[in-house]
Amino acid sequence: MRILVAMVFALAAAGFATFTISHNVADNIVANQHFTMPGEAARIHALIYMATNFLALLCGYVVGWLLGYAVRRRPQGH
């Protein structure tokens, strides 16, 4: 049950980041850099976008894991 809660939180955090935060973070970081080729800027933008989503996924999983501690299954008989 704890893993299920962690996965739900991870999915929610990744979805939230995908539609709200990641694009702005990638835009701001790429805007402060100087590139010689447009393809280079696009690759860095995509990398930062995916990295932000991955970090949100990990953060959501950790939060869900910690909150899932309350709903963990206890052994029968105790």
Image (tube, helix red, strand yellow):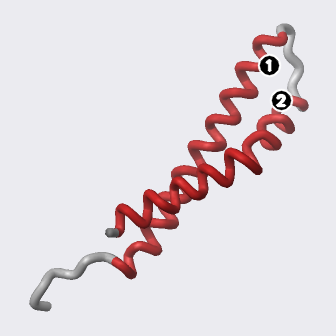
Mark 2 vs mark 1, CA separation in Å = 7 Å
- What is the x, y in percent for residue 44? 73, 24
Q: Secondary structure at mark 1?
A: helix
Sequence order check, earlier mark of 2 and 1:
2
Relative to 43, residue 21 above or below:
below
- Please give the residue where the numbered disc 1 appears in the rendered image: 41
Query: Residue at the location (51% across, 56% down)?
Result: 10
Q: Tell me the quadrant of the picture where the N terminus can be found.
A: bottom left
Relative to 29, residue 10 above or below:
below
- Please give the residue where the numbered disc 2 appears in the rendered image: 30
Q: Tell me the quadrant of the picture where the C terminus can be found.
A: bottom left
Q: Nearer the viewer, residue 1 or 26?
A: 1
- What is the x, y in percent for residue 70? 39, 81
- What is the x, y in percent for residue 52? 66, 43
Residues at circles 2 and 1 in contact by the CB criterion of under 8 Å: yes
Q: How many marks?
A: 2
Query: Residue at the location (53% across, 53% down)?
Result: 11
- What is the x, y in percent for residue 34? 89, 20
